[in-house]
Image (spheres, rainbow, N blue to C red):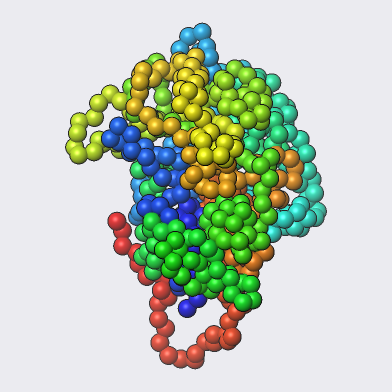
C-alpha cells in the first residue's frame, strides 16, 4: 500500500486525507495545533466559543462529493441548512434601515429588493449581472476551478475550446472589476456591494480583474449554515478520513520535508526528531513557507518565493461577546465605508483603513440553526457571539519581533471599526469582552505570509495563472490550501486538496510495477470504499 504524509489539517489537507484514505492509500496527517481546521478554528471569549476563521459556506457540492466518494453523506456528520438571506448590507442613512439591502437565495427576491432599494434600472442591471456572472461560472467551473493545468491562458483556452474564444473574452480579464461593475450598477452603493466579492480572495476591486465577478454567482447559488460553524465541517472531514483509516498526529510540528538520494520527497521530520517515511508528501501550508525554508533548505527549491508586493490582504478580526442595539442583524452582515477607494489606497500604503468596511457574522442570528448554548449549563445572557472582520495590509512580519500593532493602534482600529458600525445603525456595548487578531497574529499562526490570508493577490489579468498548483519542482511533493490553485475560501481550499490527491493517485499509479488483472470466475468482494459509514 502506498503512503502519504500530509502537513497541516486545513481544508485542503483534510479534503486530501479523506479522498486518499477512501482509496486505500495510507495517510498520516501531521498538525502542529491541537485542533483541525487551519484558519477555521475557534477561540474562547468570555466563556463562549467563537468561530475564528471563515464563516461563509458555498459550493456545497464540493463537500457532498468528498463524502459520497467515501460512501457517506455530509448530513450524516453535520447539520446543514440553506440560508434564506445571503447577506444584509448597510450604508449610513438618515434613519434606521434607510440604506440597508438584503440579497436572497431566491434570485427574484434579490431583483425585487434591489429595485426597491435603487430603482428599476438598478434591478435590470442586476438581472444582466446575474446572467453574465452565471455565464462566467459555467465557462470556468470545470476547466479552471476544478482543473489543474492552468499555468498560462493557453491550456485554459484549450479546455474551453478554441472555437469559444468569445467566451474567454467575455470574462473581461483585462478590465478591472470596479470598472466592469459600473456597466451594470450606476449606483455607487451597488458597485461597492458587488466589488466587495474581490476581498473573498484577498484582493482590491480596483486592481482585480472583472473575472472575479463570478464570485457573486457562487454565493447566489446558495449560502449554507452549518451547526457549529465551519470548524464543525473540518471535524467532520477528520472523522470521515479516520473512518477510512487515516492517522492524525495532532500537536506535532513538521520541521523538515525529507528528500531521498534522487531528490524526491520521501517523508518528514517532526520537531521531536521522529521521522515519518512516505511515498509522497502534501503540504497544506502557504507555499511561501516552503520557499523560505520553513520546512528545511533542501525543500525550498520546490516553489518560487512570493514577493511582498504580491501578497493578498490580511485582516483585523475581533471575536466579541457583546450586547448589540439598533440595526437588525442577520447571520452575515456588511457595513460599508463612505469612501471605498480611499479604504484600499490606505491598505496599499501599509496602513489599516481609517474608515473601514466591516463584515459582522452574528453567529447566533439564524432561525435555521439551533441557538448556541453557554458552557456548563449557564443561562444565556443578552450578549451574542460576533466575528467582525476589517481588511488590513499584510505586514505582520514588517516589525521584527514587535507586534505589527501596539496597544494604542489596536484601540484606534477598534474605535474606527465601531464608528463604522454606529454610522450604519449598529451599536455594541462599551468595554465589550473581545479578542483581536492582527496581521502579526496571522503571521505567527501561518509563517512566511506576513499575515496574508489568501496567498497571492488576484491583481492583474495573469494573477490566476500564477498561483502555485498542486505539483511542485520536487517530485512527490505537492501543495494544497487556500494559498494555492484554484483560489482562497473554504470550497476552493478543499478543491486544492482534491487536486493534490488526484496527482498523488496518478503518480502512484505510474509507479506500479505490474497491472492488476481480472480473475475469471471466483467470488466478488465489496470494495473497501463502499463500506457503510456509521452516522454520528
Q: Quadrant of the C terminus?
A: bottom left
- The residue positioned 71% from the left and 26% from the top of the image is 182
Q: Please identify the residue farthest to the top as the structure is shown.
A: 94
427 relative to 524, above or below: above
187 relative to 436, above or below: above
Query: Is 403 in front, or is 528?
Result: 403
Query: Is 239 in front, or is 346?
Result: 346
- The residue positioned 55% from the left and 68% from the top of the image is 258
- The residue positioned 71% from the left and 45% from the top of the image is 463
Q: Residue 305 location in percent, x, y?
A: 66, 52
Q: Residue 288 location in percent, x, y?
A: 61, 51
256 relative to 133, above or below: below
Q: Please identify the residue farthest to the front as the structure is shown.
A: 401
Query: Is 486 in front, or is 441?
Result: 441
- The residue positioned 72% from the left and 55% from the top of the image is 151
Query: Is 33 in front, or is 457?
Result: 33
Q: Residue 478 location in percent, x, y?
A: 59, 62
Q: Residue 338 location in percent, x, y?
A: 59, 17
Q: Viewed as shown, does residue 107 lie left or right of 328?
A: right
380 relative to 1, above or below: above
The answer to whether residue 58 shows anywhere in this view is no
- Count numbered badges in the picture: 0
Quadrant of the rendered structure where residue 508 is? Answer: bottom right
The answer to whether residue 475 shows anywhere in this view is yes
Q: Viewed as shown, does residue 261 lie left or right of 379?
A: right
Amino acid at each position: 500500500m502506498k503512503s502519504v504524509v500530509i502537513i497541516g489539517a486545513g481544508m485542503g489537507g483534510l479534503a486530501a486525507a479523506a479522498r486518499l484514505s477512501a482509496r486505500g492509500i495510507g495517510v498520516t496527517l501531521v498538525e502542529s495545533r491541537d485542533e483541525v481546521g487551519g484558519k477555521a478554528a475557534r477561540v474562547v471569549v468570555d466563556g463562549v466559543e467563537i468561530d475564528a476563521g471563515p464563516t461563509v459556506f458555498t459550493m456545497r457540492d464540493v463537500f457532498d462529493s468528498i463524502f459520497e466518494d467515501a460512501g457517506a453523506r455530509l448530513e450524516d456528520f453535520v447539520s446543514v441548512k440553506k440560508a434564506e438571506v445571503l447577506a444584509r448590507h448597510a450604508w449610513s442613512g438618515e434613519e434606521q434601515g434607510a440604506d440597508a439591502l438584503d440579497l436572497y437565495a431566491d434570485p427574484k427576491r434579490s431583483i425585487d429588493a434591489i429595485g426597491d432599494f435603487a430603482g428599476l434600472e438598478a434591478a435590470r442591471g442586476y438581472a444582466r449581472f446575474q446572467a453574465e456572472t452565471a455565464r462566467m461560472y459555467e465557462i470556468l467551473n470545470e476547466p479552471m476551478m476544478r482543473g489543474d493545468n492552468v499555468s498560462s491562458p493557453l491550456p485554459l483556452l484549450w479546455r474551453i475550446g478554441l472555437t469559444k474564444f468569445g467566451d474567454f473574452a467575455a470574462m473581461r480579464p483585462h478590465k478591472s472589476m470596479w470598472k466592469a461593475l459600473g456597466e451594470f450598477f450606476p449606483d455607487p452603493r451597488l458597485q461597492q456591494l458587488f466589488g466587495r466579492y474581490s476581498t473573498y480572495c484577498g484582493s482590491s476591486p480596483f486592481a482585480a480583474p472583472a473575472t472575479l465577478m463570478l464570485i457573486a454567482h457562487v454565493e447566489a447559488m446558495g449560502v449554507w449554515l452549518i451547526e457549529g460553524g465551519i470548524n464543525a465541517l473540518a471535524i467532520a472531514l477528520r472523522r470521515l478520513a479516520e473512518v477510512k483509516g487515516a492517522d492524525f498526529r495532532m500537536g506535532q510540528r513538521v520541521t523538515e520535508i525529507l528528500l531521498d538520494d534522487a531528490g524526491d520527497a520521501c517523508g518528514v521530520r517532526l520537531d521531536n526528531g521522529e521521522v515519518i517515511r512516505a511515498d509522497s508528501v502534501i503540504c497544506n501550508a502557504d507555499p511561501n513557507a516552503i520557499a523560505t525554508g520553513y520546512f528545511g533548505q533542501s525543500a525550498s527549491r520546490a516553489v518560487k518565493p512570493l514577493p511582498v508586493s504580491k501578497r493578498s490582504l490580511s485582516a483585523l478580526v475581533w471575536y466579541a461577546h457583546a450586547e448589540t442595539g439598533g440595526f437588525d442583524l442577520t447571520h452575515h452582515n456588511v457595513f460599508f465605508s463612505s469612501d471605498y477607494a480611499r479604504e484600499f489606497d490606505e491598505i496599499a500604503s501599509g496602513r489599516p483603513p481609517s474608515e473601514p468596511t466591516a463584515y459582522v457574522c452574528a453567529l447566533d442570528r439564524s432561525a435555521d440553526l439551533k441557538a448556541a448554548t453557554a458552557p456548563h449549563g449557564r443561562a444565556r445572557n443578552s450578549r451574542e457571539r460576533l466575528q467582525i472582520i476589517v481588511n488590513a495590509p499584510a505586514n505582520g512580519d514588517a516589525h521584527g519581533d514587535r507586534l505589527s500593532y501596539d496597544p494604542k493602534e489596536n484601540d484606534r482600529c477598534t474605535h474606527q471599526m465601531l464608528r463604522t458600525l454606529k454610522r450604519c445603525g449598529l451599536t455594541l456595548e462599551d468595554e465589550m469582552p473581545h479578542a483581536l487578531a492582527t496581521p502579526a497574529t496571522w503571521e505567527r499562526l501561518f509563517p512566511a505570509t506576513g499575515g496574508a490570508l489568501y496567498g497571492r493577490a488576484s491583481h492583474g489579468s495573469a494573477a490566476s495563472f500564477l498561483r502555485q498548483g498542486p505539483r511542485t519542482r520536487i517530485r512527490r511533493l505537492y501543495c494544497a490550501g487556500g494559498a494555492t490553485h484554484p483560489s482562497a475560501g473554504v470550497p476552493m481550499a478543499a478543491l486544492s486538496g482534491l487536486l493534490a490527491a488526484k496527482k498523488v493517485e496518478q503518480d502512484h499509479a505510474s509507479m506500479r510495477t505490474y497491472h492488476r488483472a481480472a480473475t475469471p470466475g471466483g467470488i466478488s468482494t465489496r470494495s473497501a470504499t463502499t463500506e457503510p459509514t456509521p452516522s454520528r
